[in-house]
Image (tube, coloured by chain):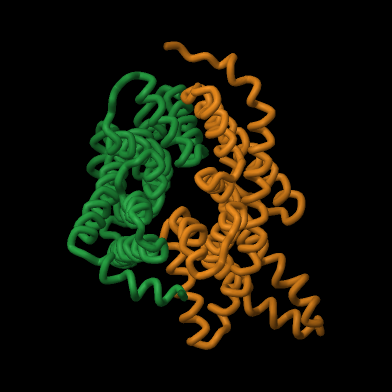
Amino acid sequence: MSAWDIIVSEAPRFFTWWNLRFLALALGNTLLASVAGCAIGYAAGFALAMLRLPQLVGFAGLRVAAIFWVEIFRRIPFLVLLLLVFFLSQFARLEAPLWAVAVTAVALRMSALAAENIRAGLETVRPTQWEAALTMNIPALTALRRIILPQSWRVILPPSIVHVLSMVKETSLVSQIGFIEITFAAKMLTQRGFSALLTYGTALVLYFCVSWALASLGHWAERRLTLRPAPLTP
Amino acid sequence: MTLQYGQIIQYLPDFLIGALMALWIAGLAFAAGLVIGLFCAAALTYGAWPLRAVVTAYVRFFTYTPQLVQVFFLFFALPEAGITLSPVAAVLIGMTLNAGAYLTEIERAGFVSVPQAELDAAETLGFSRLQVIWYVIAPHVVRALYPALSSHYIIMTLGTSMAAIFGVEELTGRALNANAISFRSVEIFSVVAVLYILLTIIASTLLWCLGRWLFRVKARVF
């Protein structure tokens, strides 16, 4: 039987209400792990980027610690990081649910990538603006909030959407600890006897649609935010 | 329960061979992907529209779906169509196609970086086509692309850990084997994480030196 015959003969049995509902739940879990993980990771990455600002943090030791954090979590493969978090939570007897393990691993990896992105964004604002603000006795945090961030968020936002996209793809590795996201759902359906052509093919199509939507959003944000002249050019 | 690192020292030589294997798998896929990327980037820059559409679809498909699921598809679905691949072959083919898609995007930037004036100057001086490629185009392309290419090689080295899921015995695969024997999970995976960090730092430093000596480019180490 050729590949096409297999797909045609199995499709009515595969695309039933229950299977589609199961896949939709799995898609929801993929989005939950990647979006929640990225949100937490971006919050942590923002804190790390702030630690690296000499205007804000006078102690060089903290800056070095932030650099080490970024370099360490950027260089561990996601699968190894995930297994490490998984086994550490067992070792500490936290009895963490699988989604928490997945979100933690995504957040740790994201914190390193986000810190780099935010730092690059903050550096697009000229240092003279920092100097002017500090000379006028504006507190450093206020200067960051009222002067630097309003100019740099439009540089930070578009790559962050691309980061969510890459995390949607990376969370396919979370199937290895048994969290039911798209890849694990495809695996379960294959083990229930459906053709792997159909199950993994459907998984690929689902990932493609999500990624396409995110990439289009990213392009739109980039066009919208960066091509227009910034209102506050020095 | 305490951490006992003493018990896993015996696995270290095994892990080091695995680390070399990770570099080797990434190197093979990278080299093949570089060739695919070269042809696709040339097609995108100079090709007719049907060719461009095909290449764009290829790049989109592979950059928008996870590498793991692509290899799952190659490994589990292709046998139903009569093509059976070994785990190493499936991982290598998957990583190569994936690398080809990303490297197409990177290499396309290189084609744009050659100034037309220098091509005209070379033509005026009577350079042959090979001389133009070697003395004018290649230096520009290499210098523009080297940093992005070397950091993509590092990303691919980290990506090889995915091969462990298919039973390929690279660093992560060997860690899973050692874990199945000794159950010292936290110790093993923390050591493996440190090994990956050292491995990529050494690899990016070597690539930096190579770029510095061969092409006088500055690539990013940290």
Instruction: Determine the residue located farthest toward the front in the rendered image.
Output: A1
Reply above or below: A103 against A193. Answer: above
Instruction: Examine the image and state in which quarter residue B84 appears.
Output: bottom right
Rendered orange, the chain in question is B
What residue lies at 34% left-to-right and 73% top-to-bottom? A9
What is the x, y in percent for residue A193? 36, 57
Residue found 31% across the figure and 65% down from its top = A209
Expressed as whole percent of the image width and height from the top left, the position of residue A69 reads: 45, 31
- Picture mark count: 0
The structure residue drawn at horizontal position 65% and vertical position 26%, both measured from the top left corner, is B12
Choose between B164 and A71: the one closer to the eye.
B164
Counting from the top left corner in percent of width and height, residue A112 is at 42, 39
Residue B198 seen in the current view: yes
Quarter of the image with the C terminus of chain A is: bottom left
Residue A222 visible in the snapshot: no
Q: Compare residues B60 and B142 and report the one nearer the observer.
A: B60
Q: Position of residue B80 (x, y in %)?
A: 48, 66
- The structure residue drawn at horizontal position 77% and vertical position 71%, both measured from the top left corner, is B134
**Colour green maps to chain:** A
Q: Residue furthest top?
A: B2
Seen from the viewer's position, the closer of residues A89 and B130 is A89
Q: Is residue A151 left or right of residue A60?
A: left
Q: Left of B26 or right of it: where is A55? A: left
